[in-house]
Image (tube, helix red, strand yellow):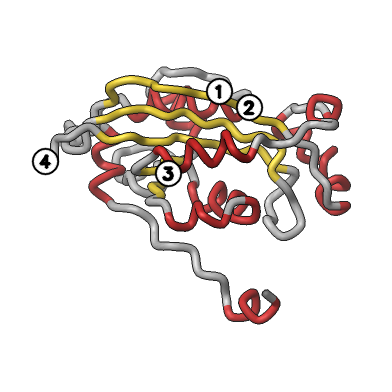
Amino acid sequence: MLNKERIGLVLDVETTGLGPATDEVIELAVKLFSYWPDTGEIIDVLKEEAFLREPMKSTARRNYERAFHVHGIPFDAVKGKSFIDEKIKAYFHQTDAVFAHNASFDRSFLLQMYPEVNELNWYCTMRNVPWKQYGFPNGKLLTLLQAHQITSYQTHRAMDDITYLMELLKKTSPNGNLYLQEVLEYGPMRKYRPSVSQAKMG
């Protein structure tokens, strides 16, 4: 039954900064898709959605202006907005695997809001492919998108990033496999475990 089609979820977050304890997610984009696990071939996009939310922590709000220079989402766009938890959780419940570029970053933020994501199988599209061995200068998304002639410009909006990432995963690696197949063969990330100090604080 290896060749039974599976359901994947590719996602990306935009945040007010780099620290999950002090910063917050302000945008989440998700795309549910079907794929063949043996070849990594993407069959179809089933559903996609993007969500915005206003950050609540004082530290996250203070950091907003600096983060704005990266993601370009004006505060007015998120003001008064909140995530629709039931919809977001429905995406998590439907998937066999979650894919993200630098997945540990996305997971560390989503864990703060949805602890159940730690039980999902997460795959990192940045670390699960030996991009440097393949001759690319680094594994940054924009570098790879440019090298594969997908786009030369990155908006840093979550839906754009996952749309481009899916195009990258459909490409063939120098080894002759689809990149999604290599990501899958590398295997899922280990479950997140809080450090001893975090566990004590909790």
170 or 199: nearer the viewer = 199
Instruction: Say which label, 3 or 1, has the lower sequence index.
Output: 3
Determine the residue positioned at 85% across, 38% down: 65
Q: In which quarter of the image is the N terminus?
A: top left
**Which amino acid type corresponds to the residue marked 3 in the rendered image?**
Met
Separation of disc 1 and disc 2 at Cα? Answer: 6 Å
Residue 157 is labelled as 2
Dots 3, 4 in contact, CB < 8 A: no
Quarter holding residue 53: top right
Q: How crowded is mark 1: few (under 14 residues within 10 Å), some or many (20 or more)?
A: few
Q: Quadrant of the C terminus?
A: bottom right
Question: Would you say residue 173 is visible in this rendering?
Answer: no
Instruction: Say which label, 2 or 4, has the lower sequence index.
Output: 4
Separation of disc 3 and disc 1 at Cα? Answer: 17 Å
Residue located beneath label 3 in the image: 126
Horizontal placement of 136 versus 13: left or right?
Answer: left
Instruction: Say which label, 3 or 2, has the lower sequence index.
Output: 3
Separation of disc 3 and disc 2 at Cα? Answer: 18 Å
